[in-house]
Image (cartoon, helix red, strand yellow):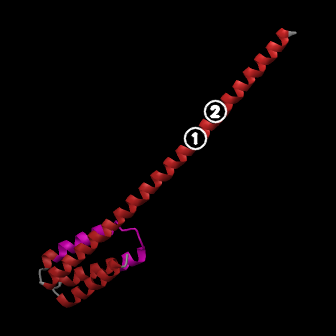
């Protein structure tokens, strides 16, 4: 009789240790899933922040080229202006925000480029000012 009770107690203690092991494994799985979710969320935040910073850099670079082209056009230095206008057009291709505004600003830059090649300082400067206003709204 005492042997049966020992076996029952041994079985009960074995099953309770199995239950505590299963509970421990469940808790560990929850911790792993939580850590993975946190890691994914934080990495997505870093990616979106860097994408925003890159977009801002492209806009600033484009604005700087257009401003320098405007200064060159006002000095009637059309060869330097054309170089800055080409650089502005290539850097504006990397801008992904508000495509309609970027498209209109690029059209103004192209028009200014055409006008500067023909030597029209006033109209070229007007087109560059329009482009600057549009790029600065981004």
Image location (x, y in percent) of residue 86: 23, 71
Quadrant for the C terminus in the image: bottom left
Count of numbered labels shown in the rendering:
2
Q: Which residues are magenta?
A: 81-104
Q: Tell me if 44 is positioned left or right of 87 in this view.
A: right
Quadrant in the rendering for residue 5: top right
- Residue at screen point 81% across, 17% down: 8
Mark 2 Cα shell of 10 Å, populated few (<14), some (14-19), many (≥20): few
Q: Tell me if 96 is positioned left or right of 33 in this view.
A: left
Residue 33 on the magenta segment: no
Q: Using the image as rendered, state which of residue 137 and residue 6 is in the foreground.
A: 6
Q: Which residue is mark 2?
A: 24
Is 11 drawn above or below residue 111 in the view shown? above
Q: Are marks 1 and 2 in contact (CB under 8 Å)?
A: no
Image location (x, y in percent) of residue 70: 20, 81
Quadrant for the N terminus in the image: top right
Mark 1 Cα shell of 10 Å, populated few (<14), some (14-19), many (≥20): few
Inter-mark Cα distance, 1 to 2: 11 Å
Looking at this view, name the residue that lies furthest to the bottom.
Answer: 122
Is 73 drawn above or below residue 2 in the view shown? below
Image location (x, y in percent) of residue 44: 47, 54
Looking at this view, name the residue that lies furthest to the front.
Answer: 2
Q: Which residue is mark 1?
A: 31
Helix, strand or loop under label 1: helix
Looking at this view, name the residue that lies furthest to the right.
Answer: 1
Residue 90 on the magenta segment: yes
């Amino acid at each position: 009789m005492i042997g049966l009770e020992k076996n029952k107690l041994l079985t009960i203690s074995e099953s309770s240790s199995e239950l505590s092991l299963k509970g421990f494994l469940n808790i560990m799985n929850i911790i792993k899933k939580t850590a993975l979710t946190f890691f994914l969320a934080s990495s997505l935040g870093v990616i979106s922040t860097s994408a925003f910073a890159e977009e801002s850099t492209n806009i600033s670079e484009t604005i700087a080229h257009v401003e320098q082209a405007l200064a060159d056009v006002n000095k009637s230095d059309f060869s330097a202006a054309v170089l800055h206008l080409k650089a502005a057009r290539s850097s504006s291709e990397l801008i992904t925000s508000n495509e309609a505004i970027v498209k209109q600003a690029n059209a103004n830059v192209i028009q200014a480029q055409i006008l500067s090649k023909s030597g029209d300082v006033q109209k070229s400067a007007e087109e560059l000012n329009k482009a600057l206003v549009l790029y600065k709204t981004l």
